[in-house]
Image (tube, helix red, strand yellow):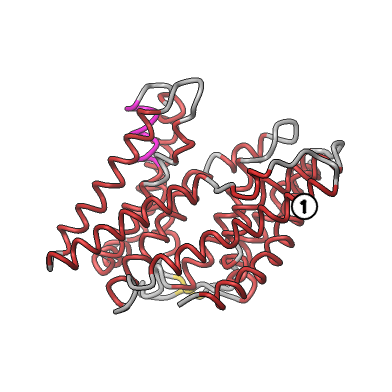
Amino acid sequence: MMDYLLTIFFLLISVIIGGGKSKPQDHADELFSKDYTTVLKGICCIVVVMVHIREGYQNPLQDAIGSFAFVCVTLFFMVSAYGMQQSVERKVDYLRHFWRNRLLALLIPCLLINVSFYLINRMMNETASLGTLVHINNYVVVLLGYCLWFFIVMKVKEKLHIQQHWVTDLMLVGGVVLSSLYSYFSATPGVVSAGMGWCYERYGLVWGLLLYRFLPQVKHWLVNRRLGKFVLFSLLSLLIGVAYLKFKGVFFYGEYMLKIVLGGVIIVWMLLLTVKRKYGNRISLYLGQISYEVYLSHGFVMSVIIMLFPGLSSGQFIFLTYVITILFSILVHAAGNRLVKRWRA
């Protein structure tokens, strides 16, 4: 029982601080506002940690919560695509400084975390490869790939004076779909997991672009007869979830298509749940601000904890992982922010 309480402690706290002080509204003006997405990222990063808990320290509750991590990563991609599209259409010089700003924001935290854990391993007399210093998380690699395609498409739009949004939107969506299919079909069964290329989760880039393009219509649809739609999508999430558990071994149609549909349905369910509330307090917003560092560092933190305290129970290991990861992420975020602000255009 204690292991389960320790397992769920930080998730409960993040949900409470994220939604406990939210304010009900009669409209949907706050949907995907800056505060909304920041709080969302904070809760999602807590869930993502669950799926990576090391073997020997897992438990059924952690495994159940971790099953939803793919939806959370999808949401991370969704927020990124939404933000990039919003910025390029509202900021005149956005593309001029695009690469400088994106690379600083994405890679400085990676570098700081890599250097920190390289030095920690050396101090603990553990083998530390120099390759650790330049390691880039696969999530970041996929996001950088989208940044490259996004930049190319926007430059083509600029050079050819394309006025119709649907043309560039189609190009962006096509790039994501093709890259996802390539990632899935190029994986060697039993050797390389298709999930290593985030082939399912990267559809969040498509959802983010479409949400930005049709935000007024989406808000209207979500608010109109919301309760009935919430019940419907609750049932759909349950039914498709059960179907996925049964057919996830079926190549492509079950393993790929059904998982993508399930993720999309759960995201719609989540939007229906949260659309008419205003979110944001100091703690929940700060957790969202350090979510990127939490995501990047939690795997390293687990390795260090296992070296120092190998005899921990499942709950103790999970609780300590969150404590150290959050404290470490606060430090990395503070240092990284200073460097990014100094060099950012």
In the picture as drawn, the residue positioned furthest to the front comes out as 130
Q: Position of residue 195 (x, y in %)?
A: 47, 35
The answer to which quarter of the image holds residue 156 is: bottom left
Residue in the image at 79% along x and 41% along y: 1
Residue denoted by label 1: 119
- Which residue range is magenta in the image? 252-262
Q: Quadrant of residue 34?
A: bottom left
Instruction: Report the predominant secondary structure element of the magenta stretch.
Output: helix
Q: Is residue 335 left or right of residue 323?
A: left
Q: Nearer the viewer, residue 260 or 200?
A: 200
Residue 276 image offset from top left, x and y in percent:
41, 69
Q: Nearer the viewer, residue 253 or 236?
A: 253
Q: Residue at x 69, y 49 (%)?
A: 8
Taking the image as drawn, is residue 228 in sight? no
Q: Is residue 118 above or below residue 332?
A: above
Residue 21: horizontal and vertical position, in percent? 58, 73
In the rendered view, tell whether residue 186 sits above or below residue 343: above
| Residue 256 shown in magenta | yes
Determine if residue 180 is in view.
yes
Q: Residues within 10 Å of mark 1 (few under 14, many from 20)?
A: some
Can you say whether 224 is above or below 235 in the image? below
